[in-house]
Amino acid sequence: MHRRYLVVIKPQAIADIEDAAAFIEEQSGDSCVADLWETAAYEQIKHLETFPNSYPRFSRRKYRHITYGRYLIVYRVDDVELKVVVCRVVSAWRDRQRIGPMESD
């Protein structure tokens, strides 16, 4: 049986998802497209409950990421507490060194 991890989404990651959905709606002119993107983003995050360490490392070593379309879902894994913390959702086109802090706490 596989271990299941608790997935926690930081407020900044939620704000990132909302900002990306707003941008997608603005660019597409269709709120349904943005809603579908947002729903699918949360589905990708839910997959982190199992095998979160199977995704590649982000440029900052303690973080990993899932590529979701043109975005990176950046998270860290706590294998002791069986917890995944989603920290940011950023454009894959951004300079990884200029993203800023992953976590505020």
Image: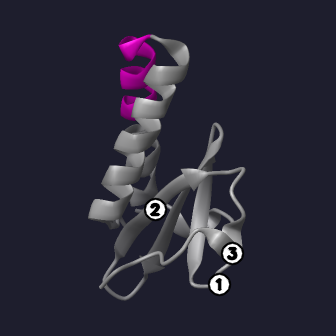
Residue at the far front: name it.
26
Left or right relative to 54: residue 42: left
Horizontal side of 26 relative to 92 (left or right) equals left
Residue 80 on the magenta segment: no
- The secondary element bearing badge 1 is classed as loop
Residue 20, label in figure: none
62 shown above or below 96: below
Q: Residues within 10 Å of mark 2 (few under 14, many from 20)?
A: many
Q: On the rendered image, what quadrant is the C terminus found in? A: bottom left
- Residue 79 seen in render: yes
Q: Nearer the viewer, residue 3 or 57?
A: 57
The answer to whether residue 84 is above or below residue 94 is below
Asked if disc 3 and disc 2 are in contact, CB closer than 8 Å, the reply is: no
SS class, disc 3: helix
State the separation of the CA atoms marked 3 and 2. Answer: 13 Å
Q: Which residues are magenta?
A: 30-40
The mark that comes first in sequence, 1 or 3, is 1
Disc 3: which residue = 97
Residue 67 vs residue 100, the one in the foreground: 100
Q: Which mark is residue 88?
A: 2
Image position, residue 39 (x, y; %): 36, 31
Hey, what amino acid is under mark 3?
A: Gln
Disc number placed over residue 61 in the picture, else none: 1
The answer to which image quadrant residue 22 occupies is top left
The kind of residue tagged 2 is Arg
